[in-house]
Amino acid sequence: MLEFLAAHTALQALIKLTLLVLAFVMPLASLSTWAERRQSAMMQDRLGPNRANIGPIKLWGILHFVADAIKMMFKEDVVPAKVDRFLFALAPVMAIAPVLITFAIIPFGSDLCVGHATEVLKDPSICSAIIPMQVARMDMGLLFYFALASLAVYGTTLAGWASYNKWSLLGGLRASSQMMSYEVTMGLSLMGAFIIYGSLEPQAIVLAQGNNVWNWGLFTQPLGFVIFMTAAIAETKRAPFDLPEGEPELIGYFVEYSGMRFGIFFLAEFIETIFLSAVVTTVFLGGWQVPGLSAEGFSFLPLPHVAVVLIQIVIWTFKILALCWFQLLIRWTLPRFRPDQLMRLGWKQLLPLSLLNIVLTAALSLWRLGGK
Amino acid sequence: MGSTSGHGHGGHDAHGAATASHADSAGGPRKGKVGVRIVGRPDSLEQRLYLPEVLKGLGSTAKHFFANLFARKYTVTVEYPEETVKYPERNRGLHRLMHRETGEVRCVACMLCPTICPAHCITIVAEETGNQNEKRPKIFEIDELRCVVCGLCVEACPCDAIRMDTGVHAPAVDFRGDSILGKIDLLKRGTLSKATQGGVGSDWRDRQPTMKQYDPEPK
């Protein structure tokens, strides 16, 4: 079975993509809609949605996300009279497709060594065939993410323009200016990590970080971490950078959308936060690496290969969940920036800082190399 | 956060002077000064760096989050259908009509309550009882949709016949007519009242014990 999969890479990729997107990302994104309301409530000394239930099954109100989905599906899909119908329909797809595709580059476990899954793997070179725990392993790696992230701008801008509504147009324009400004910083802030780990490819970055916590990006690139986190939160268009939405004055670029089309924008936003968590995990938190866990298991407890991979996947999931929680914490704590403050922060503070980070990292790396 | 100090910016002094002169011209000399707290720009290095303040804020919300998650430390929510707050003793709920010892309605159809009712929600039609001194209500209806729950009917009643102390909310109804409560409905909630029917007589004041009787040492 595993050998067959290892031989047929296309089928393998399809299964991994299906599992990753349909069994992890989409449920987590829908759950975030509930988690956001519940967590914000807890932070504000309220209880939040805790009542949705199927008979006696209540589960702290988790089922609210099912209720929300059903509601979205059955709501009337209103299309205003003067909208550009083609672009109006295209915009939600343009918003959600890039963020879903980019999950292909995220590694969620070390390579599964086919044929030796139940043994303690002493020597990785005995593997004849591997199943990588990553959908697509491309040398361009994170550049692919930057490319697709810029495509996501079209979704919001098109939505704003096609809606034939001044407020949504303003929202769309704000979104495009904001996302373009912060993309620059986002890309540059990761350069330091690329210099240190010597690769753009996520799996290689994770492998280079190793299972020693002090070698993870959070400690080797603290400045890069803060800058990337800030810029990437701005890229997800959520508070404190939710100017495109701007509830009090604009409602947002999706003001004319209703039903599931609105739901897709909403979901895309949450998927973006999950993806941001995934990237931060990969580059700054050691990806699927578990402190002290090598391919043979822990130093005090040798584990079969498949158990090692499973532990890595579980820990990877926990890292993602923790970062999602952290982003919700930020979203419900900080007040929104003004547009001019946003631009000043992006261009005059974060961009020079990220350049400084590159120079510092390069100088330090050169110094360390020269010392050897 | 918010612990800012007012530094001596030029503009602040001028502003303070303008406020003082305005106060003088408006109301003459005042006893208490109007306190003006000048809040300066957040210009300490820590605040300008923004990040330490962000972390402080995140710490504060995270503290609340975990305290509420594990112990519901700060939440004050009453989860209504399952738990209710205890109403104060004088809470005004649905009306009820009180009984005499015989189980008859205490109401004598004096029309004081429909007269005082600002919402005109009480309808009384009186009938003979055979007793020369009293009438009784043939129809006694309260439209709970019109009722504004002011409690004036209870104040007006000389017979302790109508009360609003049930602690019950007006029920949700499918038809407006269902919210009109008749004499039977109102009597069902009622209980025996021990007040003297018809009052204790106009000379009750004379029958009260005088202060002298209670005086321990009369002088």
Image (cartoon, rainbow, N blue to C red):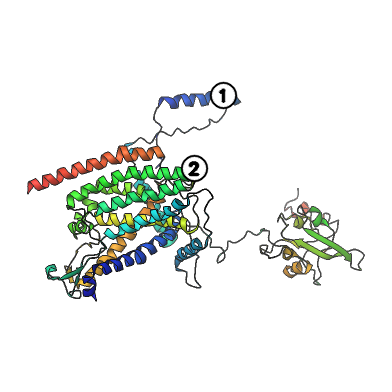
Image mark 2: chain: A
Amino acid type of the residue tagged 1 in the rendering: Asp
Relative image position of residue A1 (x, y in whole percent): 24, 76
Q: Label 1 neighbourhood size at 10 Å, few (<14), some (14-19), many (20+)?
A: few
C-beta proximity under 8 Å, tags 1 and 2: no
Q: Amino acid at mark 2?
A: Lys
Q: Residue at x 37, y 40 (%)?
A: A342
Q: Is residue A158 visible?
A: yes
Residue A315 falls in which quadrant of the image?
bottom left
Between A116 and B119, which is closer to the camera in this rendering?
Answer: A116
Q: Which residue is mark 1?
A: B24
Which subunit holds the residue at mark 1? B
**Helix, strand or loop status at disc 1:** helix
Could you give the CA–CA distance between mark 1 and mark 2, rounded to whole angstroms? Answer: 49 Å
Please tell me how crowded label 2 is: few (under 14), some (14-19), or many (20+) other residues with Cα within 10 Å: few
A328 versus A305 height, above or below: above
Is the same chain shared between marks 1 and 2? no
| Outermost residue to the left | A372
Mark 1 or 2: in front is: 2
Residue found 56% across the figure and 24% down from its top: B24
Residue B35 x/y as whole percent: 50, 33
Q: Secondary structure at mark 2?
A: helix
Which residue lies under the disc numbered 2? A166
**Residue A103 tag number:** none
Position in image of residue A253 (x %, y %): 45, 48
Q: What x and y, as percent, mark residue B117?
A: 77, 54
- Horizontally, is A347 left or right of B27 in the view? left
Dividing the picture into quarters, in which one does residue A106 lie? bottom left
**For this rendering, which residue is in front, B160 or B82?**
B82
